[in-house]
Image (cartoon, rainbow, N blue to C red):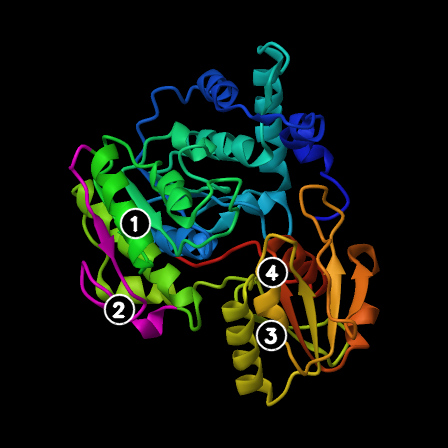
């Protein structure tokens, strides 16, 4: 993930890398690319996932649910786990280098037929979304599951009207970018709902956020859909799925949202529900590297917990899980850009030796003061040898870009996320 895009995906990043200060993503230009790829009248059922945290988990579990029902599912997530081939999957399996290269050629051909970019640019996440939709059509998928990059109404997922929307927990991440308040952020994310949306499934939200979601969904769908709030204790519809079939920790509620959203899409389309045993089997096969996942550093005795915790609550939960499994944590590797909950993480990490890792991406800033006893390194210095030197029990916590680097170091298998 670090060090630039490979040839297979260069076209997805070209306009973003050449963007000028103040430029915004150009949804109209992305819509024209979609049209040139034959997606203007897309008829595939669409399940769209929005939220501040847990979107990848919800998208994966929604896809697993639909696949358990016998549907062929194309899933687009952002960013990838170890690389960009991970962003587009069919039935949980990554598209692969050859598939991504072929999609890149189609994007390249479409861009040649457009005038040069003007006031806006095509975002990488947006182009992967469009390419993923085209791939789904090409392989005869029965449904698309699309994870929004940052927003909702302003994100390229809004180019494809969703039958069902899944909403993971929403909090104040990207304040000042998506909106000046958490309620404004919620309105932006819920704005992906459209007149054809049949169901909206949400994790429990703060009352002000829930009120905003309820109002925006009613307005956007003309009253045809209301927000259904679920917890991680069980999922209903087509039988009950006990929490034992869902992941532990904070990701459980997002998984429950995803499964429920998948069941609601099947119901909306009049499709048979998966049998209880079949659904449980597929859900129990889900493996999500980087979401409270456990690894051994190759060639060493070092065990690594990788988790994309981005706030104090998430960091504390991951450390609790590590101590429950290992008894103690020798060292924490942490990467939290300025817009994440660094203060909460510092409090949760008190008493632990910490190495803070800075990424070289210009859209991520690392300027906030850190505790003086923390070691600070650049991502280029994060090697297997350095990690092995930190001890035998290392917790790697932070933004998904960083966790992707850790997954590279431990050579995690990210090719397939579930089995059908």
Q: Dot 4 surroundings within 10 Å: few (below 14), some, or many (20 or more)?
A: some
Give the magenta-colored segment's residue range. 222-246
- Separation of residues labelled 2 and 4 (CA atoms): 28 Å
Residue drawn at x 56%, y 70% as measured from the top left: 315
In percent of width and height, residue 37 lies at: 48, 20
Asked if the residue at tag 4 contacts the one at tag 2, i.e. Cβ–Cβ closer than 8 Å, the answer is: no
- Separation of residues labelled 2 and 3 (CA atoms): 32 Å
Q: Dot 3 surroundings within 10 Å: few (below 14), some, or many (20 or more)?
A: few
State left or right for residue 8 relative to residue 91: right
Q: Earlier in the sequence, mark 2 or mark 4?
A: 2
Determine the image quadrant of residue 374.
bottom right
Q: Dot 1 surroundings within 10 Å: few (below 14), some, or many (20 or more)?
A: some
Query: Does residue 271 appear in this view?
Result: no
Of 289 and 20, which appears nearest the observer?
20
Of 138 and 409, which appears nearest the observer?
409
| Residue 381 vertical placement versus 182 (above, below) | below
Quadrant where the C terminus sits is: bottom left
Asked if the residue at tag 4 contacts the one at tag 3, i.e. Cβ–Cβ closer than 8 Å, the answer is: no
Which mark, by number, is residue 413?
A: 4
Residue drawn at x 48%, y 40% as measured from the top left: 178
State left or right for residue 347 relative to residue 242: right
Of 153 and 89, which appears nearest the observer?
153
Tell me the residue that label 1 is attached to. Answer: 70
- Separation of residues labelled 3 and 4 (CA atoms): 32 Å
């Amino acid at each position: 993930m670090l060090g630039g895009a490979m040839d297979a995906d260069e076209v997805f990043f070209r306009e973003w890398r050449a963007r000028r200060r103040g430029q915004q993503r150009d949804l109209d230009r992305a819509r024209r690319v979609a049209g040139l790829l034959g997606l203007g009248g897309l008829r595939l059922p669409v399940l769209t996932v929005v939220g501040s945290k847990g979107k990848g988990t919800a998208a994966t579990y929604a896809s697993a649910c639909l696949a358990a029902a016998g549907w062929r599912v194309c899933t687009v997530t952002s960013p990838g786990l170890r690389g960009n081939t991970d962003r587009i999957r069919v039935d949980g399996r990554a598209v692969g280098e050859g598939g991504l290269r072929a999609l890149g050629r189609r994007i390249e051909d479409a861009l040649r037929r457009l005038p040069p970019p003007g006031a806006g640019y095509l975002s990488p996440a947006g182009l992967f979304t469009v390419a993923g939709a085209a791939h789904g059509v090409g392989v005869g998928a029965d449904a698309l599951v699309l994870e929004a990059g940052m927003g909702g109404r302003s994100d390229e997922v809004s180019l494809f009207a969703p039958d069902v929307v899944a909403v993971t927990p929403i909090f104040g991440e990207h304040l000042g970018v998506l909106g000046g308040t958490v309620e404004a952020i919620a309105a932006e994310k819920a704005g992906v709902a459209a007149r054809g949306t049949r169901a909206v499934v949400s994790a429990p939200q703060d009352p002000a956020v829930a009120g905003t979601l309820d109002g925006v969904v009613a307005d956007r769908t003309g009253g045809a859909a209301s927000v259904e709030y679920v917890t991680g204790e069980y999922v209903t519809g087509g039988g009950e799925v006990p929490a034992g079939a869902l992941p532990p920790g904070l990701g459980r509620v997002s998984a429950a949202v995803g499964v429920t959203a998948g069941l609601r899409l099947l119901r909306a389309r009049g499709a048979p529900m998966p049998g209880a045993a079949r659904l449980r089997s597929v859900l129990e096969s889900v493996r999500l590297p980087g979401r409270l996942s456990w690894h051994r550093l190759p060639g060493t005795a070092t065990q690594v917990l990788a988790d994309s915790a981005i706030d104090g609550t998430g960091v504390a939960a991951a450390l609790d899980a590590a101590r429950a499994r290992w008894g103690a944590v020798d060292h924490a590797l942490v990467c939290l850009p300025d817009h994440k909950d660094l203060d909460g993480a510092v409090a949760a990490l008190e008493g632990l030796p910490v190495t803070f890792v800075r990424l070289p991406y210009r859209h991520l800033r690392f300027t906030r003061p850190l505790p003086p006893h923390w070691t600070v390194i650049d991502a280029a210095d994060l090697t297997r040898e350095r990690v092995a030197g930190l001890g035998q029990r290392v917790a790697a916590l932070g933004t998904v870009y960083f966790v992707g680097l850790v997954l590279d170091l431990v050579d995690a298998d990210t090719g397939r996320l579930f089995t059908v």
